[in-house]
Image: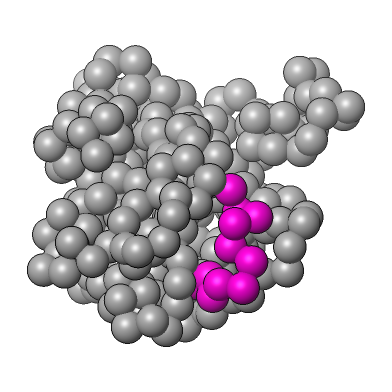
Amino acid sequence: MRWLLILVGLLAWQAQACEITMGYRTTARMPNINAKPSNAGLYLDLYSEAAQNIGCKLKVVRSPKNRILRRIAEGSIDFYPGLTFTEERAKDIFFVENGLFTAFVGLTRKGGGQITSIDDLANKTILVALGSPDPKSDKVELQYKRPPELSFDRAIELVLDKQADFYMDDFSTLYYYLVRHPRESELMLHLNCCGGLTRLSLGFSKKSPHFQAVDNPEYDASKPLSEFNYPTKLATGTVADQFRLALLSLEVQGFTDTLFKDYYGASLQELMQAD
C-alpha cells in the first residue's frame, strides 16, 4: 500500500510538473482571445483541452507580439496559438497544425474593384501588424504601414480614415468584427486575393524543454520549404508531439469544429459562402 501511495503521488507530481506555456499579444483577437488581462476565448478552450488530455496544464502569458516571439525563440514560452509560417521564423519555431482552418482575405473601403491578387495593391498602403509577415509581390513595389499592437478595431479605423488602403488577415476573425461594426456598409472584403483556404498552425519553440526533433523521411528537398514540407519532425513521445496528437484527436472527434461553431456561429466554409 505504501508503494502504491508513493506511485500515485509521483504520477500526480509529474502531471502537475507538466506545464505548457502559450504566449499571445496583449490586444484581443475575438472570439479567439480577449484583450489582456482576460484570456477567455476559443484558443484557451482548445489548448486547455489538448493540454489536459496529455496530463498537462496550460499557462498563458501576454505581452506585445514581438516580445512574445523573442521569448518563444529563447524557449521561455512554448508556443504561439496561431502563426503563419515563414522561413525566417522557422529558424527558431517549429510549426504544428492545430486542427483549425483559415483563409486570408483582404479588407478595403468600398468603391474600388475586387482585388484578386497581391499585385493589384501597387500604389496602395498595406496595413501590417508588427511581427507579421508582409504580403509579397514579385511584379510590383508595395508600401507598408506598421503600427505597434494593431487590433482589429484599430485596423478598421485606419482603413476607414484613409490612413491605409488594405488590410489582410484571417477571414473568420475579420468577419466577426466586420458584421458588428457600425460602419460595415463602408467596407468590403476580398475573398480571392490572398491564397484561399488553408490549415492553421501554431508555432512551437525549438528551445522549449518540451521540444525535440528528428529527421523527417518524408521531406522533399525539391519542393518549397513549408510547415507541411520540413527537414525535421517532432520526436515521438515528447510533450510537443503528444500535444500535436491531442490536437489532431480533438479535430478528428469533431471537438474543434464544434468549438469553432460555438464561437463563430458557423463553420469557416459556411461563413465564406454566406458572405
Q: Quadrant of residue 267?
A: top left
The vertical placement of 214 against 134, above or below, is above
- Depth check: give the residue in front, 119 or 55: 119
Percent across and percent down for residue 104 are 46, 46
Percent across and percent down for residue 161 are 32, 83
Q: Is residue 87 visible in this depiction of the protein?
A: yes
Percent across and percent down for residue 157 are 29, 78
Look at 49% across and 36% down and name the residue there: 196
**Would residue 174 be found to the left or right of residue 18 on screen?**
left
- Depth check: give the residue in front, 169 or 123: 123
How is the model colour-coded?
Answer: one colour
The vertical placement of 146 against 31, above or below, is below
Q: Quadrant of residue 211?
A: top right
Quadrant (top left, top right, bottom left, bottom right) of the C terminus: top left
Extreme residue in the right direction: 222
**Would residue 17 be found to the left or right of residue 132 on screen?**
left
Q: Is residue 207 magenta?
A: no
Question: What range of the chain is rendered magenta?
Answer: 117-127
- Depth check: give the residue in front, 158 or 28: 158
Look at 47% across and 40% down and name the residue there: 192
Look at 53% across and 30% down and name the residue there: 241
Quadrant (top left, top right, bottom left, bottom right) of the N terminus: top left
Look at 71% across and 56% down and name the residue there: 137
State the count of labels: 0
